[in-house]
Amino acid sequence: MSLTALPLLKLRAYGEPEKQQQMAKAMVQRTFRFFIGFMRFTGVFNFAFPAREQLQHCRGQVIIANHPCLIDIVALISFVPNADCVVKAHLWRNPFMRGVIKSSGYISNGDPEGLIIDCERSLAQGNNLIIFPEGTRTEPGKPFRFQRGPANLALRTQNDMMALRICCDPVTLIKNEPWYCAPPKKPTLTIEFLRAVPTTSYQTEQPSIAARQLTRDLEAYYNKVLESNGKYKT
C-alpha cells in the first residue's frame, strides 16, 4: 500500500490533507475487512462482532476496550466507522508501516504534550477514537490496570465513552507468547458492546481528580465484567 495505492491516493487528493487522510482511513478499513474475511474463509479464525449494530452510527466518540489479543485493533478498525487510533511511536519509524500510518493521520503517542490535542482534533473532525486504557495487551488471569489518558480525553472533550468487551476463546496471540503458538482448536474473537459511560457527573470535580475517579470506576467495572465472563453490564 505504501508503494502503490497510497501515493496514487495522495495525488488524487493533492492539496486536501484532511480528505487524503479520510480516504486513507477508508482504504485501511477495507484492507482490514478483507483480512478478517480471509482468515474466516481459510478457517484460521472465527469472528463475531455484535457491537457493530450499536456503533454503526457512532461519530466523534471515545471507544474503549480491553486488549487480550494481537489483532484486536485490526478487528475494530474493520467495522468501526471513521476509526482513528493512537499508535506506538516506534511504529512511525517502521519502514513497512510508517507510510500507512502517516497517510491515515493516525496519532503518535511519542509526544505526551501534544497527544491530547491531537485526539481532541480527531474527535472534532467526527472520527471515532479507539483507545485501549491498559496501554498494552491484557495478561491472562491478571486484573485490569487502566491508565488515565482515555478518561482525561473524554472529560476534556465532554464526550461519553463507548465501552466494548473483546473476548478471544481459546486465548491466542497474547502478550509474551510467540504468534506461531496455535491453540488446540480454532479461536473465536468476539467484540460486544457493553454500555455508554456518561462523564457528565465527573465534570464537577477538578480535572485531575475527576480523571482519577473515572479511571478507577472504569477499572472496577471492567474487572467485574471480567469476573462475570461478560454478564455484568449495569
Image: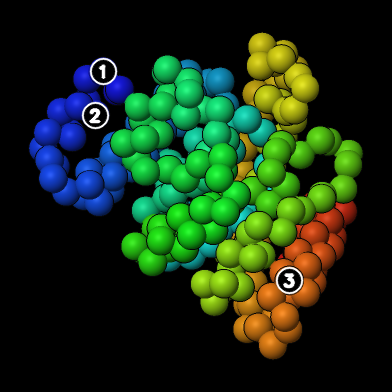
List the residue tagged with mark 3. 208
Compared with 172, 136 (above or below) is below
For marks 1 and 3, give the CA distance. Answer: 44 Å
The picture places residue 89, in percent across and down from the top left corner, at: 55, 34
The picture places residue 75, in percent across and down from the top left corner, at: 51, 39
Using the image, tell me which numbered label, if any, was put on residue 3: 1
Q: Quadrant of residue 184?
A: top right
Residue 196 is at least partly visible in this image:
no
Q: Amino acid at mark 1?
A: Leu
Viewed as shown, does residue 114 lie left or right of 3?
A: right
Nearer-the-camera pick, 225 or 159: 159
List the residue tagged with mark 2. 6
Residue at image location 83% in from the left, 36% down from the top? 140
Q: Residues within 10 Å of mark 1 (few under 14, many from 20)?
A: few
First along the sequence among labels 1 and 3: 1
Q: Is disc 2 placed on a helix, strand or loop?
A: helix
Viewed as shown, does residue 123 lie left or right of 228?
A: left
Nearer-the-camera pick, 28 or 106: 106
Q: Amino acid at mark 3?
A: Ser
Residue at image location 76% in from the left, 53% down from the top? 146
Q: Nearer the viewer, mark 1 or mark 3?
A: 3
Q: Quadrant of residue 183?
A: top right
Compared with 63, 35 (above or below) is above
Compared with 212, 79 (above or below) is above
